[in-house]
Amino acid sequence: MSQAMWTAYIFLIRFWIAVSATILDNQAQSEIDHVINTGIQCRNIPGLSVAIVKDGQVLLSKGYGVKDLDTQSPVTADTQFQIASTTKAFTAALLSNVVAGDSGKKISTNVYKVLPGRFKFNNTLRSTYTTMEDLLAHRTGIPRNNYARLATDYSTQNFAGKFRYLRHVGGFRDSFYYNDLMYGLAAHITTHLGQRPWKQQMQDTIFTPLGMSRSTFLDDVNFQSDDVATPYLRESGRTLKASLDFVRHWGKNDGSGNIVSTSNDMAKWMLMLLNDGKDGSGRRVLREGVVKEVFTAQNVYPGSSYSANYMRPVTPESMTTDRYSLGWKLGYYRGYNMIQHSGSTFGYRALLTLLPEMEVGVVTLMTGSDYQNKFRTALHMHLLDHALGHVPWINSSSVCTFPDPWRSSSSRRRRSVEDEVKTMEDDEEAQLEVRETRAGRVARAARFRLSRYPGTYRHEAYGNLEVRMNTSINALVVEYGVGLWRLQSTGGHSFDGLWLKAPPTLNKSFRFKTSGLRVYAIEGTGFASQKPPVFYRI
């Protein structure tokens, strides 16, 4: 064997050891086990998988709880979870890598220059100047419009021509409006530039070179497999399975949240990012400059009302985020530079935290609900302290109560649920909290006879919405894509839409628009807090 081959062999062996070993001392391992096992019980988390890396090695990769409440089979480090919005970091890295290989383009190249045809946004300013960087940094000023994803024929390719029909609510490049659809568009651009499907490029560029053999995509995962975590969510105090059909459909938005992975695989991803895009043998996975590019701040991150719970003087230590790069939030923990992103979708939760100067990374993947990221944040601060050599200030008691007991009684008074939900930029499931307030409203007589409301209504981006009379339940129903609601009048032309399918229970409000005795449109008021979509009768 030549010296070069022997050197490469030694590097590979060291890398394999790095991603396979558990090297925490017994006391630290025991404390972590106790905190996590206590936390998942008190927080009603069915299953969780965690990985900690430091200095090119895996300190811990382990599963806790169960994959399925019926079978009670335990979670392992190879159990697959949807990683939700932590997918965005993969999407940004892949697109940046593709662009870096094209001498004629940069991540700051205008979108209309990289897509064929006459791609447009809703006005000349955005159509002319929006760049790929703007998409990834949430700088377009266009709100989420996430429920367009309920359309039966939704795909990133189909929707690419519909962005011109989405209205903006914020300024261009001077606002932060988190938008999953823009990451779907980024995946579509990647497909076009790389001349292969986004999923195939992700597999060939990142998964395979890193040995992420258990990583795949939501529409490809086999939920009947022995090692896939069942999606669970909390509704009305109960832990329920999320509809697999719904979860798969929601995952059609390539690029924003549809990667499925494991703690073992995510450890390899973190090690590569902390090694400037190289694997443990020193071989480049991402082109030079890509990691720096996706980690560089591009927008101010406004934070949220609940983030004050994680800052001094409320808590002994601060975990803050104040900037957004490309698929990452930037901030600090204990004064260390921190790179982080959470992920929250129907049935799954994730959080990934990097402290690049300390070469430390932590990831948690889980099922269940975690409103305002309280459990994940507390757990990450505990795990980071172990990795940094600090005495953890979060313990098995406070992991259940965080942000109490530090939070004052005055700050404990909550804002309205709707205001809180507006701050949950990557938390689709947080909107279920609104459902509790709407479902209990008293029914009132509608202004018109119910027979005046049925018809087909259309929004150019969302597609068709049907309103019809269901005689079996003697009520109006709304059908939009995979969504189905029974309408309950709240007076005038406003209605609560009560979800008629399996969980997640997406109760939404609607309001009809009229002129004289004519009903000419229906507004999906529960679809968005600002400029909700209006469907016009056809």
Image (cartoon, helix red, strand yellow):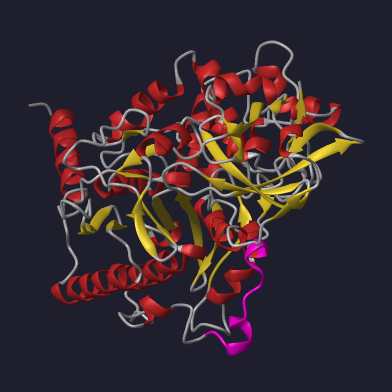
Q: Which residues are magenta?
A: 407-419
Q: Is residue 321 above or below residue 14?
A: below
Q: Is residue 330 left or right of residue 360?
A: right
Query: Which quadrant of the view contains residue 383?
Result: bottom left
Q: Is residue 279 left or right of residue 401?
A: left
Where does the image place residue 369, in percent across and percent down from the top left? 41, 59
Residue at 21% x, 44% y: name it. 15
Is 413 covered by the magenta stretch?
Answer: yes
Q: Is residue 289 left or right of residue 520?
A: left
Residue at 35% x, 79% y: name it. 392
Where does the image place residue 151, in percent across and percent down from the top left? 56, 28
Q: Can I make out residue 477 in this image?
A: yes
| Quadrant of the snapshot with the C terminus | top right
Residue at 56% x, 84% y: name it. 314
Q: Nearer the viewer, residue 492 or 85?
A: 492
Q: Is residue 180 left or right of residue 68?
A: right
Q: Nearer the viewer, residue 188 or 164?
A: 164
Where does the image place residue 111, in percent across and percent down from the top left? 69, 24
Q: Nearer the viewer, residue 102 or 179?
A: 179
Q: Is residue 470 above or below residue 292?
A: above
Is 364 covered by the magenta stretch?
Answer: no
Q: Can I make out residue 54 in this image?
A: no
- The residue lying furthest to the left in this view is 1
Number of marks: 0
| Quadrant of the snapshot with the N terminus | top left
